[in-house]
Image (cartoon, rainbow, N blue to C red):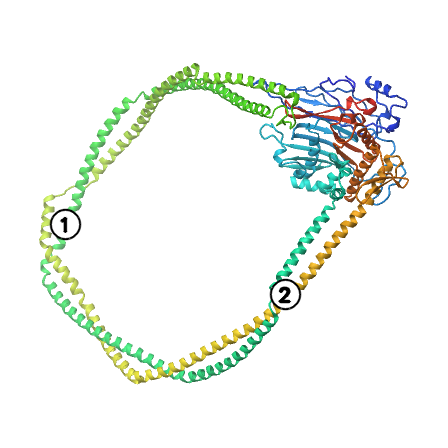
Amino acid sequence: MLSAGGPASGTGHTAVDPAGATAPRAPHDRGQGAHPQGARRAHRRSGGPVQTGDRRPDRAAARLRCVACHRARPRSRRHSRLQGSRVALSTRPAPAGGPARRDVGRARSPANAARHRTGIPRASTARCRSRSRRIRAPRRRIRRGRGPRRGGGRLMQLLRLRLVNFRQHADTELEFGPGITGIFGPNGAGKTTILEAIAWALYGAQAVRGDKDSIRRLGTKGRAGVEVELEFRLGAHEYHVTRGLTAATLRQDGQVVANSLKAVTDRLERALGMTHDEFFNTYFTGQKELSVMAALGRTERAAFLSRVLGYERLRDAQERVREVRNGVAAEVRGLEAGLPDGAVLAAERQGAEQRLAGARTGARKADAARRSAEHALGREEPRWNEWIARRERTLSLDGERRMAEQAVVAARQEFQRLDKELADALAAGEQLRQLGAQLEPVARLKREVTALERLQLEAAARRADEAQLAEVGRAVTALERRLGELRDVADALAQADAAAGALQERLEAAERAVEQERTVWVQDRQYAETKRTELLRLYEEVKEQRDQIVKLGPEGTCPTCKRPLGQEYASVLGLLDSQLEVITGDGKYFRQRLEQLAQQPAKLLDAEVERDRVVEESRRASARAGELRAQVEERERAHAELAGARRRAGDLERQLTARPTGYDPARHDAVRAALAKLEPVALEAAALEERARRAERLVHDAEGAEQQLSAGERRVRELTDAVRAEGFSDAAYRQAKDRYDRAVGALREAELAVVEARGELTRAEEDVAEAKRREAERAQRERHIAERKARQRLHNELDRAFSDLRGELNARMRPELAELASGFLADLTDGRYDELELTEDYTLTILEGGVPKPVISGGEEDIANLVLRLAISNMIAERAGQPLSLLVLDEIFGSLDEARRLHVVGLLRRLADRFPQVVLITHIEQVREGLDRVMRVDFDPARGTSVVRDDTATLGAADAGVAA
């Protein structure tokens, strides 16, 4: 095992348990006490136990782990894995009484050498001052006395961060702890990307540069996921947020509380109590912001403070008030321009009222004329209705009379027809009696011919049965002969089936052999094609990367690491050239291999020939077995057909025995000839018989027709008398119609006059109502204009009030910031300076004994800038309801010399009781000896990724605390 300060050479690491820490040492006691500095360093190197005075009770170890990426493959079939060295540390038992952390207190399993990760030991514990001061409440002076830091607040502390394919970080994991943690590295190495990952995990896309596609690491294979995991403690709760490009998850104390991008962002914003801008203006100090106030003019200083304190929202609100005021003023001008003249509206209303009075008089006259016409029509209408009824009755009776006359004519014609048909029927009966002697032999001849026809059918059926019996006999003979031929076919079929089964087994074996040979050939060809395709794609990628680097030159920005290559330009080109050479050689090999595999191999061709031969033999055997199987089925059918033929022959013989005989064809012909000779007489007798049968019915019908004719004649006489009794006259009817039409016309004209008069009245009433409506609308517009003007005056007052409020806030902001900064100043200078003034032009002035100090040293200027930035952050945090417990400082030493840089680090250390966790990001190596832990970020151009390692072990023992 190596000491913590020795070179890293192990392949595994063991977690160091920081749980048993005790009270810290004061900064001025560093290197003194029971164990001097050198003795303590030697004691740790020898593996001795850590003294209780070297640990703080609230110290948590920091650990960082970075996953190294794959280099470009030197060969196409294999690739080498890069494994960084690991630092192996001894396991130190934690002293009793310390709080146990959730992931420490047990030995870790050795790292797997196959995993290309670089294991980094946990960082040292942070040093802090033995005394602390209470941060003052808002708007109150900070107490000058020293005391413990206030507790019970919702302190925020970063615990762990992991970046996967985020910007130039492939797989980086960091663990944070209390104290001052420094993240060092050259420009462009990916230091600020760590802060950007924290911002993205908390607030999503609004906290990153560019769009979400720019977040994915260049050179990532396929669609590899982008993910950032952040663990932090806020008050009594621990949060674990995991965010990707399309999904996010938030766990609080191990329970999932949000699982979407928007839900996670909203939940974290509510938990932190700050918006994105408030959070970063509070906890984060960007590059060169410590001295930003000194470099700005008065207006720029005021704008800077307003922006970080959130006063810009007042200006935005005032701009919205002015927009509303201008809109209201434009609306008032438009309303006043469209306001009609009141005198013109009054004249229009008077004219409409006069027209309304005239229309009412005309309407009354029209109603009187209509009532007179209605009375006249009422007198004439009953007389007219009576004439209409008389005319309808007359027309109805006359129509019935004409129909009755037509019925009489039809009845007379029907009676005459029936009388004629009755005479014809009586004559037919007489003729039928005269033909009776000639029709006597017809019935006897018909019975004889029927019997002969039945015997004729039986004789024909006997001949058909005899022919069928002969045919069945021939079929029986043929079937018996065929059954003799098929006697041994069953044995032959069994032998053929056995031969076919053996050939099928040989065929399956041949098929398997062909498939095996084909599979080997196809797999070899597919493998060669796949490898050649991969080599072509890899060649294009490496060639494109090399061409781009050559195009940009040594001083150009590397497309992967986003920084100049400089002296590494030639080595990078050499590496890419060697890779291209290896890829080209492998590509030629696989191209030749593909040419060899273009044709089927000889083994495959021989196997296919053997398979085809077995297939042909199997086909012939199957055909022979099919023929024999058909013959077996034929033999079974022949047995069944033979039995059926024998049964059919017996049936035919019995049927022939039962059929009658004695048919005489000559007698049959003679009987038919006699019937043919008597046929005309029989037909004539049948017709006469039909006519004679109608005589009785015709007598009854004739009597009915005579009665119907008499009734019709009586009905005609009655209807003629009724028409005469009505006394209807066409001339009198026309006169009554003329009188009624004149009365109806007069009423219609009177009604039209009433409608016109009422229309005029309605229009006049509408004109009056329209005039009154326009006058009311004008009054309503006047009231609306008055309301708009009142609102315009209100927004004028709001504009002035916002201006006054901004002035008052700016006036109150300066003394409040000065009061907060004075408290920090007193803490940092041990009471030498206890007051700081922020003038009207936002210039810092240190007061010594109440007297402004016009000239201050560079160190005092650093103190002033630091306490002002801390006061601004503290004010934002207090207004958001969060205590200021975390500081993240990014490249704040850019404009400071070495002495002033070290002085700022000392100032930060003296504030350790107020800020338990400070993260310092810089590329200035001179300040690392004053920190509690150090993390190093470098960019590996060969892999195109950032590599992070823990350099705390390289610090001196006095500066590294109890780093292990």
Identify the amino acid type marked 1.
Answer: Glu
Label 1 Cα crowd, 10 Å radius (few <14 / some 14-19 / many 20+): some
Q: How far from the left and from the top, in percent, is residue 760?
A: 50, 75
Q: Is residue 25 visible?
A: no
Question: 869 and 622: which one is in front?
Answer: 869
Mark 2 highlights which residue? Answer: 781
Relative to 234, is 370 on the left or the right?
left
Give the number of the mark in front: 2 or 1. Answer: 2
Q: Judge whether 86 appears above or below 649 on screen.
A: above
Residue 534 placed where, x, y %? 53, 23
| Amino acid at dot 2 | Arg
The residue that appears at 72% across and 29% down in the rendered structure is: 174
Q: Secondary structure at mark 2?
A: helix
The residue beneath circle 1 is: 448
**What residue occupies the far front of the structure in this picture?**
855
Along the line of sight, which residue is nearer the eye, 70 or 381?
Answer: 70
Q: In the image, 881: left or right of 477? A: right
